[in-house]
Amino acid sequence: MGLEVNPVDQEEKPDRPDPTGLDRVGAPMGDDHPDRDSPKQRVSLFEVLMERAIQVTGISTMLLVALIFLFLLWEGVPAFFEVPLSNLAGARWYPIEGLYGLLPLIAGSLLITIGAALLALPLGVATAIFIAEIAPSWGREILKPIVEILAGIPSVVIGFVGILVVAPLFRTGLNIPTGLTAFTGMVLLAWMALPTVVSVVEDVLDTVPKTYRDAGLALGMTRWQTISRILVPAGKSGILTALMLGVGRAIGETMTVMMVTGNAPSIPVSPLDIFASVRTMTATIAAEMGEVAQGSTHYHVLFAVGLTLFVITFVVNLAAASIVFRRTRRAERMLS
Amino acid sequence: MSENPRPDVKIRIEHLNVRYSDGTESLHDISMDIYTHQINVLFGPSGGGKSTLLRMLNRLNDLADVSEQEGRILLDGENVLARDYDVLQLRRRLGIVFARPVPLPMSIYENVIYGLRLAGVRDKQQLDATVERALKQGALWDEVSDRLSDSAYDLSGGQQQRLCVARSLALQPEVIMLDEPTSGLDPISTFKVEQTLQQLKRDYTIVIVPHSVQQAARIADWAAFFLQGDLIEWDEGRQLFTDPQDQRTEDYITGRFG
Ligand SMILES: Nc1ncnc2c1ncn2[C@@H]1O[C@H](COP(=O)(O)OP(=O)(O)OP(=O)(O)O)[C@@H](O)[C@H]1O
Ligand SMILES: [Mg+2]
């Protein structure tokens, strides 16, 4: 019952009872009508086809990911046999002399990513709060598209702006020998992660029930107290997810960091080293892959770098997903 | 109207008009009183403006799209709609509990003392005492006294609602407003909340939007019937539910429409 679809009014929701109690075409509701059989079968055939199509698409996507991973393994794992582990774990990346220390690259990537996250989080959350809670509606209309446009700027362009504007500014402003530093990379990556963080946090704040705001205000809180002590804590896990997504974009980013971080493979040791050059995993792969002989040790090591990056990104995404999962579970519990 | 001497007026509403900016006139020339230590019931069909009136009383509607408001709301003789009226103080004097319980994402204990913490109270002893008093008044103490540090989300719906009542009580308000506080609750929890109200009216003034006519009739000391923004009838509960003066009131309470 309730699932038969009348061919005349396909657009009507099939299982919603007609408020008048009468079917539009005048036929009584029920399964006993012989004319009903053919459309019923057509619909179910269509459904089966759709289901299959979706299944195939889904599975092929998974296969593709698996294949990429296998390819990475295939090309990257030999590096661990060709180069002694002590070399790979070393502090010097100098392929011409056979030194393949991954530490400076990992350190460079982590430094820039964490730095970018630390910059993007407060800025992004503040912007989202402003857009969602404080700005008058016309301000919202202007700001939202701007954030979206920001997300669409190609990373080459951001890198270009970095080289031409941001780096010189830092060099003269901070009085350092070169503007192409880890810090420059952080700032630009934060800029790139910002739109993601802003839009996700904004969505999160949107889903915090209006009654929470009322509850806060009704307790005699100011608007700011309501935001900082109720809305943000209530959206905490969503905000973390936003950060992870932003970071996910930042850690895989190649072009911008290659252009603005100076690419010197050194391990940062003191806090001041954020104003020195670093080299990230992505930039290394992009810069060197074109020059290595296929099948050489250097070639395999570059894939090993890619593999490492893959694992790190995977872990970050997994963490994000598990947070989202926890959030839905809690939401379900709240509703029950 | 009844001949008994009237109780003291806590809130006097004079010719209140409220219109939202989408054009709906939600309250039209409302004049009535809220009496001290009474259960004041606002009831009527959906969209009548009951919630709007509650939200006007403690100015929660300040942030809503209200395009026009006229009239006065006098709390102890002072107009709360005046521009320079201390709204934060007002909201502590007039606590409100909503239809769906809104526990804050924290422990039971923290929920209750939240308003006090904001007001800057630090003294642990005072906070502990408040929690116990408020939860006892909210008829929840016996059920949660041994697990105050549990998350408020672990409580049942009815317990959460009483927690919200307790949270308002912790601020020692003068008036407690409840907007369909039992609409999501089972009969037993509903009964507990109603019982709690009978206790509370000794110390507080209560304004409630009940979730059914039956509930209205059960608890009302004073009742006001709202229909599409108009106050149709306002009288002592006993009088209004047994011998309504207006035909529309009678139709509604006898279930002929609504
Ligand atoms: N924020 C708002 N913006 C615009 N119109 C609103 C807003 N809140 C309420 N209204 C309108 O004001 C009228 C009265 O609404 P209100 O919520 O006060 O009714 P109610 O008596 O509480 O109804 P219910 O029993 O359904 O809760 C309705 O027509 C409603 O559409
Ligand atoms: Mg309402």
Image: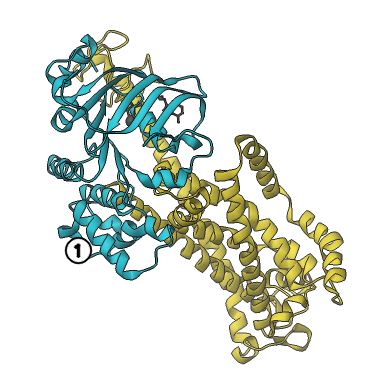
- Residue nearest the viewer, comparing B173 with A187: B173
Q: Which residue is mark 1?
A: B145
Q: What shade does chain B have?
A: cyan
Q: Is residue B47 visible?
A: no
Return the residue nearer the eye: B132 or A130.
Answer: B132
Occupied quadrant, residue B111: bottom left
For label 1, the crowd category at 10 Å Cα-Cα, with few meaning under 14, some 14 to 19 and many 20 or more, is some
Chain A hue? yellow
- Left or right: residue A68 versus residue A283 is left
Residue A198 lies, in percent from the top left, at 60, 51
Whether residue A137 can be seen here: yes
Place of residue B119 in the rendered image (x, y in percent of width and height, measured from the top left): 42, 57
- Judge whether A25 appears above or below A268 on screen: above
Residue found 84% across the figure and 76% down from its top: A176
Quadrant of the picture in which ligand 1 is shown:
top left
Q: Is residue A306 left or right of residue A20?
A: right
Residue drawn at x 43%, y 38% is: B60
Query: What residue appears at the point 86 percent right and 75 percent down from the top-left corner?
Result: A175
Helix, strand or loop status at disc 1? loop
Quarter of the figure that contains the N terminus of chain A:
top left
The x, y position of residue A153, in whole percent, is: 73, 50
Amino acid residing under circle 1: Ser
Task: Examine the image and state in which quarter residue A183 appears.
Answer: bottom right
